[in-house]
Image (cartoon, grey):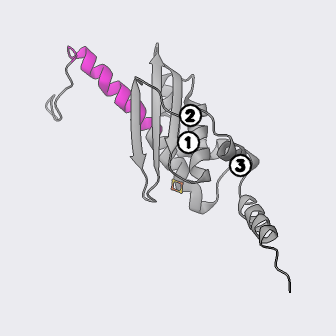
């Protein structure tokens, strides 16, 4: 009996990808906004429970996310989620970008299989942390350039 390993691999790959929307496949294969930004205004690196990390860099101009990039060591779904969250956030005002939810990422991707839903959470969380990093740096500016001590302000 002959056994065509290449054919089997191709069929398996087809079966795996058949669970994903065309949008997910497109963003996984051609991620948008990949890379880092030198002298970014905001940055975050968040590692999910699965062990994958997404990093996000952003530049802010007049309260708008003018530039945003990401990097991940995760799988194709994580790449697609990182790519999509940067597309959703680019050009948005900060309060609007802070309202981007994992559900928004999932909807924009056309959904994800149950076991990959957490990738959208990781992408949205990382975006929020990068925005908060920027906001913290701004709070430092208003404080005479000094970062407030943790716990300062009576909290
Ligand atoms: S598999 Fe871990 S974030 Fe996607």
Tell me if label 1 and label 3 are in contact, CB under 8 Å: no
Confirm whether the magenta stretch covers residue 65: no
The quadrant of the image that shows the N terminus is: bottom right
* Whether the residue under disc 3 has CB within 8 Å of ligand 1: no
Instruction: From the viewer's perspective, tell me whether residue 100 is left or right of residue 145.
Output: right
Find the magenta span and give its range.
127-145
At mark 2, the secondary structure is helix
Tell me which label, 2 or 3, sits earlier in the chain: 3
Q: Residues within 10 Å of mark 1 (few under 14, many from 20)?
A: many
Instruction: Kindly identify which residue carries mark 2.
Output: 86
Q: Is residue 98 above or below residue 141?
A: below
**Distance of label 1 from label 2 (alpha carbons):** 6 Å
Residue 101 x/y as whole percent: 52, 41
At mark 3, the secondary structure is helix
Confirm whether the magenta stretch covers residue 131: yes
Could you tell me how many numbered marks the image carries? 3
Tell me which label, 1 or 3, sits earlier in the chain: 3
- State the mark number for residue 46: none
Instruction: From the viewer's perspective, tell me whether residue 24 is left or right of residue 99.
Output: right
Prevalent SS, magenta region: helix
Instruction: Kindly identify which residue carries mark 3.
Output: 25
């Amino acid at each position: 009996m002959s056994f065509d390993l290449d054919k089997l691999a191709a069929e398996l790959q087809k079966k795996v990808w058949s669970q994903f929307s065309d949008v997910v496949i497109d963003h996984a294969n051609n991620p948008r906004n990949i890379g880092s930004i030198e002298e970014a205004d905001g940055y975050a690196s968040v590692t999910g429970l699965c062990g994958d990390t997404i990093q996000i860099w952003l530049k802010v101009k007049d309260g708008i996310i003018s530039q945003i990039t990401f990097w991940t060591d995760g799988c194709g779904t994580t790449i697609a989620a990182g790519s999509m969250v940067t597309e959703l956030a680019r050009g948005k005002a900060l309060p609007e970008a802070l309202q981007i939810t994992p559900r928004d990422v999932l909807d924009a991707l056309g959904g994800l299989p149950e076991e990959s839903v957490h990738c959208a959470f990781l992408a949205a969380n990382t975006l929020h942390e990068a925005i908060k990093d920027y906001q913290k740096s701004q709070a430092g500016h208003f404080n005479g350039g000094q970062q407030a001590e943790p716990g300062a302000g009576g909290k």
